[in-house]
Image (cartoon, rainbow, N blue to C red):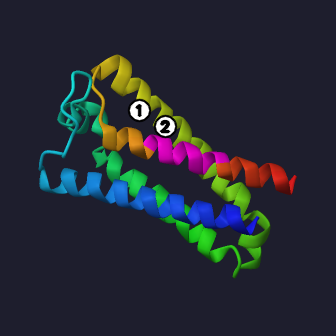
Amino acid sequence: MRDIRRIQILLVVVGLVVAAYLSYLKLTDLAAVCVEAAAFDCNVVLNSRYSELAGIPIAYLGFGVYAIIGALLLMETRVVFLRENGSLLMFGLGLFAWLFSMWLVYVQVVLLQALCPWCLAHELNFTILFGTIVYRVLRTL
């Protein structure tokens, strides 16, 4: 279980870096470093109407989710409530965030017909992180 926790912390750090970069782009309105290929167009994705939710950039929300999961991971060994319920809290937050991420993949592929490698990296990273969260929950049942 200790190794899974270390992997989760590593995935959180990777996610924070990617989300911080995407947040920086949104904040500064700079163009993303992007792959130059037919299906890839970061700026279409990052500047679409789907890049914000109720006026809040999706990148900020992603950063927040990673920060919360990271805080839960760091605090679960120190706080009794989190030791007992931290995995379920991460599962609830992770499930919602993962489903939202999968919706964003759908948006890129079907609605925008443009892909952002940074966004896809986040979505892959979060899928792996969510898989580890599910694994931990199943181990505790």
Q: Nearer the viewer, residue 70 or 124?
A: 124
Image x and y of residue 7, in percent: 60, 61
Q: Residue at x 41, y 52 (%)?
A: 62
Whether residue 52 is visible, yes or no, is no
Instruction: Check residue 129 for magenta coloring.
Output: yes
Instruction: Check residue 105 for magenta coloring.
Output: no
Quadrant location of the N terminus in the rendered image: bottom right
Q: Main secondary structure of the magenta part?
A: helix
Q: Residue at x 65, y 45 (%)?
A: 131
Q: Which residue is mark 2?
A: 100
Q: Which mark is residue 14?
A: none
Q: Nearer the viewer, residue 128 or 45?
A: 128
From what the image shows, is residue 136 above or below residue 105? below
Q: Are marks 1 and 2 in contact (CB under 8 Å)?
A: yes
Q: Amino acid at mark 1?
A: Leu
Find numbered disc 1 in the image and state the secondary structure of the residue it sits on.
Answer: helix
Distance between mark 1 and mark 2 Cα atoms? 6 Å
Image x and y of residue 32, in percent: 18, 45
From what the image shows, is residue 99 above or below residue 20? above
Find numbered disc 2 in the image and state the secondary structure of the residue it sits on.
Answer: helix
Q: Residue furthest bottom?
A: 78
From what the image shows, is residue 129 above or below residue 83? above
Q: Which residue is mark 1?
A: 104
User: How dense is the environment of label 1, judged by Cα within 10 Å: few (below 14), some, or many (20 and up)?
Assistant: many
Q: Is residue 50 left or right of residue 97?
A: left
Q: Nearer the viewer, residue 39 or 106?
A: 39
Magenta highlight range: 123-131
Whether residue 19 is visible, yes or no, is yes
Q: Amino acid at mark 2?
A: Phe
Q: Residue at x 40, y 52 (%)?
A: 61
